[in-house]
Image (cartoon, rainbow, N blue to C red):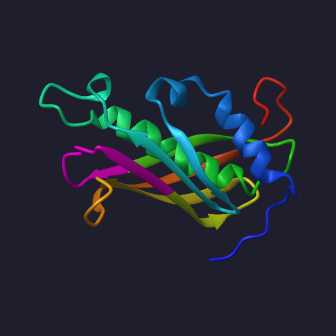
Amino acid sequence: MSFVPADAGYAQRVRDNFARQGAMRTLGASLEVVEPGHVVIVVRHKPELAQQHGFMHAGMLTTALDSACGYAAFSLMPAEASVLSVEFKVNLLAPAQGPWLRCEARVLKAGRTISVVEGRALQHDGGGPEKLVATMTATMFTVQGRPDVQG
């Protein structure tokens, strides 16, 4: 699926916004890919993000997937707009062990007010094939005219 962003400066706007997000900084996440309607966020698995069995905590993984979905939708919005999650569903398919997790999101339907985004979390070790560990379907809301919620 190919999208045309409403803002020619979308990529820098997404990167600037990501840099201001404390949650992604806390996770140690990095923004690897920014394209119209497509974003990739990478998170290194570390003990601080793990649950009691050493797997990445589902809440941490969900946070990274939610951000990937939000930024995929945000990349298509007008310059003065922002995005908030309305709802999402996560399927946890396998324990996330890392050492790296790639959270990839693609917009399925970009609307003026509501966008639907699909996210996938894949673990990789740099050697073998990636393993799908979680999926997300997210609904994102376009926010405009609110000074307290701007891109």
Q: Residue at x 26, y 25 (%)?
A: 47
Between 73 and 95, which is closer to the camera in this rendering?
95
Residue 130 % position (x, y): 30, 62
For the N terminus, give its image quadrant.
Answer: bottom right
Q: Is residue 39 visible?
A: yes
Q: Residue at x 57, y 59 (%)?
A: 116
For the C terminus, give its image quadrant.
Answer: top right
Name the residue at the left extreme.
53
Q: How many marks?
A: 0
- Placement of 54 over or under 93, stated as above or below: above
Between 51 and 45, which is closer to the camera in this rendering?
45
Q: Is residue 86 visible?
A: no
Residue 136 % position (x, y): 41, 54
Between 16 and 66, which is closer to the camera in this rendering?
16
Q: Is residue 102 magenta?
A: yes
Q: Residue at x 33, y 56 (%)?
A: 126
- Asked whether, in this view, residue 110 is left or right of residue 136, the answer is right
Q: In the figure, residue 34 lies in which quadrant?
A: bottom right
Q: Residue at x 55, y 63 (%)?
A: 106
Q: Is residue 67 magenta?
A: no
- The magenta stretch is 90-104
